[in-house]
Image (spheres, rainbow, N blue to C red):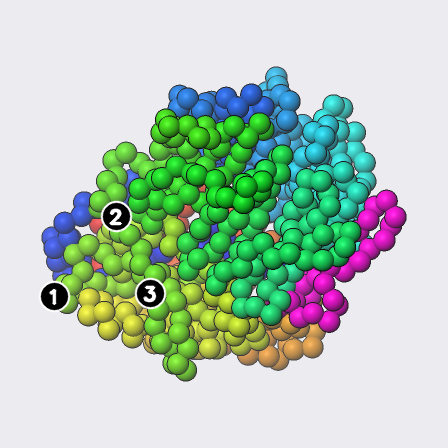
């Protein structure tokens, strides 16, 4: 099921401290202080597609202030710009199998209507999915490497059909027409079998196997099974399917289904969710990602020997993703730490030579010693439930010099705060602020029971987790009980408005980044391409056609008369998930009620602010807002 309100910008944060306390913290802390620009000069990098000859790695980077495609030579020499967009963010996907053409995706101003483009060898670009109001995505290469797959909702905006496109001439063939909300999750190497996923509820989803040769379609598990099921990948010989499920277990585990005998073999089960599994091109290596207490644990296994692949040891860092070269002689991999952004390395398998570092994302003026390593902690909530989160203690905080604190609520619903690098969190912590990134009930990663605890109880028990977390912060002895604010992006933005509306006075101020304020409208206006998940969203959040009264009762807009504390709202004008009118109306209602409100709209952004200039403006404005209303001198 898609995450309704998750967002890359959910990590925008700000908080407070009194004027004297601010000065005291500055002098008490040994850490050097950095500006917003200095910490946001950290480069955003993603992707790792190795070129056919293995000499380069294709990535996406915002080093110019906007996302573009680059090639990184594996010898560590300078990056080669491949696109030079100054307006639309470009997301590089993959090199072609036999030459250095590559595929990328781009939308228009953050409207999430991505198209799939090919960048030709001469530098020209071609839209392979032209048309208005459609959404498309790249879905991988055929096993014979003569074609690739895309999905697009051009036929019916509610559902995504699967097409195969040839490498030469880009002729397109319809592979699967989706009329029932069953989205393609995996394609067998011989193209005979498709694994089709269908969400029912947040606790139940199905996978169907379509045999394109016979037309037969069958359900992977018994229809009566109440479990989440997700197809991961077919074996290279097409004889089996790897899939994830939480059937009769709190966490997702990995199974291999023999398609001929219809029997299952357990591959891996842990006390944490396995969130992904994939095979290398030849099928020799199986890579499994585990969400272990808000950190990624990666396991790579040699299928033939059953032994783990010996990966480089990176002191103080964890390898989070691995991409294999076509001949599987080398890998590109990311490493990450809580105070170190995820850098990309290249390494020849079995080599005694250290990996080559291809990126250096952290601004060289920033010393990691001045930053803070996050700590995963738990607290007991109002009803006895153990609730986890990620705590950042600023340098200089002590019982004698208490720090202000920020409760940060992630997006979702059902997202997770993770102990990963965040330039924004590190900025505010560097300025002397404690940050608690809460994983309130309903967050993913802590078992299916915990995940379902907020179903149709949003803005209630999950909100009380946030309020109760204040006491945990106070009990540290180094947090100022009178200087605790709340902030969040997306669903976290809803929680901010819910806190100021339904728990008036619990927090000194709040910053809402494109959060829902009117659930009736939001659920009626969800993007058409989420049709397959509509029923699941309604069962989790409420049906606007039959439960309007309930949804109005949890929507801050209809209770804005309760807002007394300062509020700031940030919004992207092109947001297709939380329409701008949501923010327009809560701002007007709060102002009419006499509350002090600042409002900032970005005309060239959607649900998540991608352009660095907008991120900087948003962070600075949020900081100035909180400083102004909480009596803190602006630096």
> Which residue sits at x=14%, y=49%?
30
Q: Nearer the viewer, mark 3 or mark 1?
A: 3
Q: Tag 2: Cα neighbours inside 10 Å, few (<14), some, or many (≥20)?
A: many
Residue at image position (75%, 57%) is: 262
Residue at 44% x, 39% y is 310
Q: Which mark is residue 377?
A: 3
Residue under numbered circle 1: 400
| 155 to the left or right of 40 | right
Q: Residue at horizontal 48%, vertical 63%?
A: 271
Disc marking residue 371: 2
SS label for mark 3 = strand
Residue at the far right in the pictured view:
214
Mark 3 to mark 2 CA distance (whole Å): 19 Å
- The boundaries of the magenta stretch are 198-227
238 or 305, nearer to the observer:
305
Quadrant the N terminus occupies: bottom right
How busy is the neighbourhood of tag 3: few (under 14 within 10 Å), some, or many (20 plus)? some
Residue 311 in percent (x, y) is at: 42, 38
Q: Are marks 2 and 1 in contact (CB under 8 Å)?
A: no
Residue extending farthest to the front is 305
Q: Depth check: give the residue in front, 149 or 547.
A: 149
């Amino acid at each position: 099921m898609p995450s309704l309100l998750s967002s890359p910008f959910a990590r925008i944060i700000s908080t407070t401290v009194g004027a004297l306390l601010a000065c005291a913290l500055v002098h008490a802390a040994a850490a050097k202080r950095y500006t917003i620009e200095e910490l946001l000069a950290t480069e955003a990098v993603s992707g790792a597609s190795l070129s056919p000859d293995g000499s380069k790695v294709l990535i996406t980077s915002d080093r110019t202030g906007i996302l573009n495609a680059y090639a990184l030579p594996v010898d560590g020499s300078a990056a080669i710009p491949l696109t030079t967009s100054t307006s639309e963010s470009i997301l590089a996907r993959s090199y072609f199998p036999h030459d250095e053409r590559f595929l990328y995706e781009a939308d228009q101003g953050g409207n999430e209507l991505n198209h799939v483009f090919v960048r030709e060898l001469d530098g020209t670009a071609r839209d392979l999915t032209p048309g208005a109001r459609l959404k498309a995505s790249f879905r991988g290469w055929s096993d014979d490497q003569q074609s690739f797959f895309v999905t697009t909702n051009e036929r019916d905006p509610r559902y995504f059909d699967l097409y195969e496109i040839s490498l030469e001439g880009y002729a397109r063939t319809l592979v699967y027409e989706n009329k029932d909300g069953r989205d393609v999750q995996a394609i067998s190497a011989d193209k005979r079998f498709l694994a089709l996923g269908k969400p029912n509820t947040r606790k139940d989803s199905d996978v169907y196997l379509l045999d394109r040769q016979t037309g037969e379609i069958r359900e992977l598990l018994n229809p009566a099974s109440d479990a989440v099921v997700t197809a991961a990948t077919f074996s290279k010989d097409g004889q089996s399917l790897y899939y994830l499920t939480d059937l009769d277990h709190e966490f997702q585990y990995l199974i291999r289904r023999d398609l001929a005998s219809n029997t299952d073999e357990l591959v891996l089960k842990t006390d944490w969710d396995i969130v992904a599994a994939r095979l290398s091109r030849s099928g020799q290596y199986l890579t499994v990602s585990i969400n272990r207490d808000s950190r990624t644990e990666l396991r790579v296994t040699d299928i033939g020997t059953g032994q783990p692949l010996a990966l480089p040891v990176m002191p103080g860092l964890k390898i989070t993703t691995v991409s294999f070269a076509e001949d599987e002689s080398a890998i590109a991999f990311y490493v990450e730490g809580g105070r170190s952004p995820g850098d990309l390395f290249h390494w020849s398998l079995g080599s005694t030579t250290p990996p080559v570092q291809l990126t250096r994302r952290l601004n060289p003026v920033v010393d990691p010693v001045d930053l803070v390593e996050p700590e995963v902690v738990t607290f007991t909530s109002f009803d006895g439930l153990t609730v986890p989160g990620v705590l950042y203690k600023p340098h200089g905080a002590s019982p004698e010099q208490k720090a202000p604190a920020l409760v940060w609520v992630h997006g979702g619903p059902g997202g997770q705060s993770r102990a990963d690098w965040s330039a924004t969190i590190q900025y505010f912590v560097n300025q002397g602020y404690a940050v608690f990134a809460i994983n309130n009930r309903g967050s993913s990663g802590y078992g299916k029971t915990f995940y379902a605890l907020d179903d149709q109880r949003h803005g209630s028990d999950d909100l009380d987790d946030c309020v109760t977390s204040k006491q945990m912060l106070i009990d540290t002895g180094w947090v100022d009980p009178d200087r605790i604010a709340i902030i969040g992006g997306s669903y976290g933005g809803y929680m901010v408005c819910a806190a100021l509306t339904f728990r008036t006075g619990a927090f000194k101020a709040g910053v809402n980044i494109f959060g829902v304020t009117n659930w009736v409208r939001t659920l009626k206006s969800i993007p058409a391409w989420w049709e397959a998940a509509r029923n699941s969203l309604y069962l989790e959040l409420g049906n606007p056609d039959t439960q309007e009264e309930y949804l109005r009762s949890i929507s801050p807009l209809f209770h804005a008369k309760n807002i007394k504390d300062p509020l700031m709202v940030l919004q992207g004008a092109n947001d297709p998930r939380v329409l701008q009118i949501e923010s327009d109306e809560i701002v007007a209602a709060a102002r009419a009620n006499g509350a002090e409100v600042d409002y900032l709209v970005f005309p060239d952004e959607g649900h998540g602010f991608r352009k660095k200039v907008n991120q900087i403006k948003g962070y600075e404005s949020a900081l100035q807002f909180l400083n102004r209303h909480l009596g803190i001198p602006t630096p």
